Amino acid sequence: MIESIQIQNEASYGSPCETLSGLSKFNFIYGSNGSGKTTISRIIANESAIFGGQLLWRNGISLETLVYNRDFVDENFNQSSKLKGIFTLGEKDIDVLNKIDEAKKKLNLLKEDGLKLKKTLEGEDEKGGKKAELVRLELDFEEQCWQVKQRHDGKFQGAFVGVRGKKAAFKAKLLTEATNNSAELKELDDLENRAETVFGETPLAEAMIPYPNYESFLSLESDPILKKKVIGKEDVDIAAMIQKLGNSDWVKQGRAFYKVNDNVCPFCQKKIESSFADSMNDYFDEAFDKDEVAIKTLLTNYKTNSDGLQQSLQSIVENPSKFLDTEKLKVEKELLDSKIRYNLQQIEKKQASSSQIIELDSLKDILAEIKNLIDSANNSIKDHNKTVSNLAQEKTILTAQVWKFLLESEIKKELANYLSKKNGLKQAIDNLTKQKEDKLEDYKNQNAEIKKLEKNTTSIQPTIDGINGLLQSFGFTGFSLAKSEQDRFYKIQRPDGTDAKETLSEGEKTFITFLYFYHLLKGSEFETGMTADRVVVFDDPVSSLDSDILFLVSSLIKSIFDEIRNDNGQIKQVFVLTHNVYFHKEVTFNPKRSDKALKDETFWTLRKLNQLSKVNKHDTNPIKTSYELLWVEVKNTDRSNLSIQNTLRRILENYFKILGNIDTDSICGLFNGNEKLICKSLFSWVNDGSHFAHDDLYVSIDESTIDSYLRVFQQIFIKTKHEAHYEMMMGEPPRKIDMITPS
């Protein structure tokens, strides 16, 4: 079944696209001549031939389309005197017909199974099912990949070249890397540091950080003089006293004052004997002086070496390399400076009191840590300079390592979950697709079997008999349908056998064309295919027809509606397009419809605005005429007695005189007595052309009079065999009315 029709830039349709959507089993389209109806029928007849038209079929399954429009009339009646034969299933071979019926049931079951598989695959609207699950899975994983990209895009833009702006491309690249990437897994910090060089601006080689040799400086910490008690000779007569008092450093300091005080003791202010002076000189001998020099030399060397080391480190801090952890170096340098100050104080203390044993704070660990910081920076500089010298290869290596990091550290769990679900869905989709293809193949084979059976029991004679029967029943005796001399064709002939096609009136040609199409709906122009499901279109089928045939055509079409509602036959959907108000009202009449369209029908109107066709959908039948409103007044039990007679006359005028051109005198001749008088009074006003309410005053207005008029009004339709129209407009079967006997 067709679910929607789209038309754009075709014939009288422009842009934007006009769409008939939400189509149902029965679709009624009303529009004046030239409003675009035939374009719609042509799209349904042959979508591929209309560039600007497109049909959307339910479940993607297209049905055979049979379209009655002026193209159909021209193709079948304006080229030659012969009509193509319509093959229908015969009724003699019951066994073959039963086999066809069983084959059709199997075909329908295969179709249902195929649709179930399609639903599982694609959902109700072709936007669900397993395929939609796969699409959602792909989109979800795509978003997860993109979030990873967003987190690292700032640092790794160079690794994402070509896929930075497209989610799908980034996901595809990641999946490719998951299959092919064999790079070494690196830490994020290492990757980011290298990325600054490799993916940044074209880098330059960096200078290595110089580091002074501090081994000789460290050796000063273990100088023996620091742990040596520097005192005088022990065999001098005053040595025992000095050692007993432990005041060697005090005596040494006082000796300096003694020398500058003319050998007068600086403590007691007495003249010192020469022997005491000699003892003092002997106590502080040459060895003592040598040790004093060693202490002084140690202090000098320590100051010189420490100053050089501190200046070198200060220069590194003031001109830091981007590869060096400068802040950490500053901390270590401050600690080093503090220890150097302390050690210098200790050496100076030793110089002042040489007899003391001094131990310096070791700088070994601090200098080793500083060396490690500089060595680490220099190693990075070496790597950097190596990268600079071989940048292209480094980019390739780093890019692979970045993707390896993403795969192993960022999206490993999500990737495994995605691949597992995708494999499951793909397997399910493949299995369902295979089952669907198998069902389709079975469907084709079953359909071929049906065609084979149809070919064994088809005939064009039933169509001849059916059309001729309808022609005769409606008074068309001047021509009939017969087999042509050429097999598989018909001809239209006069009672004497002569060709009648060229001499048919427009009404006759239109009517037999419609009958031919009507029988084609239940058959086929070929020996097979008469049981195929179909969509049928009637595009203005009542042109040039008088009222009798108009209502016959509408009745035949409505009989098709009944077959569809009862699920009999192969027709599954109908489109009726017309500009004829009366035909539209007849063919759309349904007493079950209230204010809204029924669930199985849609209503549309076509209008031209600024020479462009526009489609409008309506919730109910949009075509309401004054004629219909007159019938509403007749059905109304609270009607006005003053105006009801004129209402009845206007209905008769519209239906019998204007539309049907029926002789009113012949109608009145069907009545006798008082009924005949009432009939004449109704039609006399019609003949006079009077339509005013006050004209009713010439008869007595009471309930019995009104009942008489209503009874005769009903009988007019019954006696003229237009009872069906009366029933349709009143919405109920006619009541049995006792006839008035002629007086």
Image: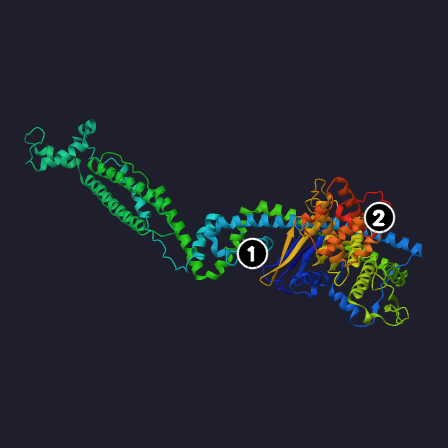
In this picture, residue 389 sits left or right of residue 686: left
Q: What residue lies at 21% left-to-right and 33% top-to-bottom?
A: 234
Decide which of 246, 510 is in the foreground and name it: 510
Image location of residue 161, percent across then percent down = 50, 58
Q: Position of residue 183 (x, y in %)?
A: 54, 54
Q: State left or right for residue 352 relative to residue 602.
A: left
Bin the neighbour count of mark 1 within 10 Å (Cα to Cα): few under 14, some 14-19, many 20 and up. Answer: some
Horizontal side of residue 397 vs 713, given as left or right: left
Q: Residues within 10 Å of mark 2 (few under 14, many from 20)?
A: few
Kind of residue sitting beneath label 1:
Ala
Q: Which one is in front, 56 or 182?
A: 56
Asked whether the residues under the numbered discs 1 and 2 touch, taking CB atoms below 8 Å apart as contact, a structural biologist would say no
Q: Which residue is mark 1?
A: 169
Q: Which mark is residue 271?
A: none
The structure residue drawn at horizontal position 25% and vertical position 37%, both measured from the top left corner, is: 346
Give the alpha-carbon distance from disc 1 to disc 2, as whole Å: 93 Å
Is any atom of residue 619 visible in this view? Answer: yes
Whether residue 564 is visible to the viewer of this picture, yes or no, is no
- Residue 470 is situated, as x and y percent measured from the top left of the image, at 86, 59
For the N terminus, the quadrant is bottom right
**First along the sequence among labels 1 and 2:** 1
Q: Which residue is mark 2?
A: 673
Q: Quadrant of residue 279?
A: top left
What is the secondary structure assignment of the residue under circle 2? helix
Which element carries disc 1, helix, strand or loop? helix
Q: Amino acid at mark 2?
A: Gly
Q: Nearer the viewer, residue 360 or 698?
A: 698
